[in-house]
Image (spheres, grey):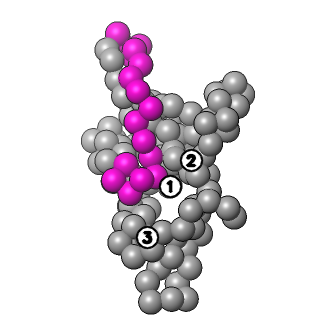
Amino acid sequence: MSGSARSGDVAANVLSALGSKYSAEILCAARTPTSAQDLADELGVPIATCYRRIEELESAGLLQCEGRQLSDEGRRTNVYRRTLDEFAIEFSGDAPLLTTEDRSAAKNEIQEQMD
């Protein structure tokens, strides 16, 4: 796996964010820019819970706001996309070591063309 390595607090924040119910499902569903409402509907997650998980995942650097889009109701809403495709956590040292495979702009563009 190529990408970046992070340790200590960053790895702990990632572990904490992923330990919450629905977090992994939200990351999987956010391969293309998706609104919180669409994520909640697709996954059957209460909208308030979805927003809390999005905030946790953003704080951990696993999800980012890609901008705003017009919703079906005509409102501007944030859309979110995951920032990585895979990661590994190593526990052999004094602190967890997180290695990530970050998503490239090219990969994001290809994904959008496929969906």
Task: Decide if residue 3 is on the left or right side of residue 35.
Answer: right
Instruction: Please say whether residue 85 is one of the residues in the magenta stretch.
Output: no
Quadrant housing residue 92: bottom right
Q: Is residue 68 above or below residue 50?
A: above
Image quadrant where one finds the N terminus: bottom right
Circles 3 and 1: CB distance less than 8 Å? no
Secondary structure found at label 1: helix
Residue 111 visible in rendering:
no
Image quadrant where one finds the C terminus: top right
Report the residue at 41% width, 27% height from top: 67
**Residue carrying label 1:** 24
Q: Amino acid at mark 2?
A: Cys
Report the residue at 34% width, 23% height from top: 77
Report the span colored magenta: 58-74
- For the residues marked 3 and 1, what is the alpha-carbon distance in whole angstroms? 16 Å
Q: Is residue 5 above or below residue 65?
A: below
Q: Is residue 94 above or below residue 41?
A: below
Residue 11: which disc? 3
Question: Residue 16: percent from the left, percent from the top?
Answer: 37, 67
Instruction: Please say whether residue 65 is one of the residues in the magenta stretch.
Output: yes
Task: Decide if residue 73 is on the left or right side of residue 44.
Answer: left
Question: Residue 113: percent from the left, percent from the top?
Answer: 69, 24
Q: Nearer the viewer, residue 42 or 102?
A: 102
User: Which is in the foreground here, disc 3 or disc 2?
Assistant: 3
**Residue carrying label 2:** 28
Q: Amino acid at mark 1?
A: Ala
Q: Nearer the viewer, residue 52 or 102?
A: 102
Task: Decide if residue 75 is on the left or right side of residue 32.
Answer: left
